[in-house]
Amino acid sequence: MTIPDSQVKSDFETAASTPIEWRPELLQLAIGYLGSIYIAADANDPVEIHESTAMGISLVVFAASIGWISERAMQGLILYAHAARSHALGRSVLASDRAHCPEPLH
């Protein structure tokens, strides 16, 4: 399934909680970040959840380190990845406990 560039940009900015100054390389990185987070959100294996979350986080740390995104955007994207990971790991608890975990964007 291919997601339109406009949707990738919208989802990435929503996860970052701040506007992004777009460049072609960053669009590809955003696709990788969102893909990693979606994999984590859908995984049932805790190791896969952690690995996919770590991959997504490493991409945004890299992007911030070379100036493609702001520190604020990086922090928002890291928080979003942590929320998605918590949600995925929380699927094994009671449904009422999961209601407090944010769901990933789709």
Image: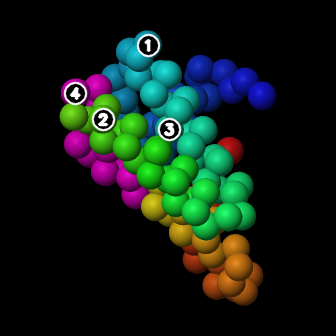
Q: Please, what secondary structure does the residue beneath circle 3 have?
A: helix
Q: Quadrant of the C terminus?
A: top right
The reply to whether residue 11 is visible in this rendering is yes
In the orientation shown, which residue stands out farthest toward the front? 47
Mark in front: 2 vs 1: 2
Residue named by callout 4: 67
Residue named by callout 3: 33
Tell me the distance, in whole angstroms, between the alpha carbons under discs 3 and 1.
Answer: 14 Å
Q: Earlier in the sequence, mark 3 or mark 1?
A: 1
Q: Earlier in the sequence, mark 2 or mark 3?
A: 3
Residue 17 located left or right of residue 66 = right
Residue named by callout 1: 24
Tell me the distance, in whole angstroms, between the alpha carbons under discs 3 and 4.
Answer: 16 Å
Report the span colored magenta.
66-80
Q: Earlier in the sequence, mark 1 or mark 4?
A: 1
Q: Are marks 2 and 1 in contact (CB under 8 Å)?
A: no
Does residue 86 lie above or below 73 as drawn?
A: below
For the residue marked with disc 2, what is the amino acid? Phe
For the residue marked with disc 4, what is the amino acid? Gly
Mark carried by residue 98: none
Residue named by callout 2: 62
Q: Earlier in the sequence, mark 3 or mark 4?
A: 3
Q: Please, what secondary structure does the residue beneath circle 4 have?
A: loop
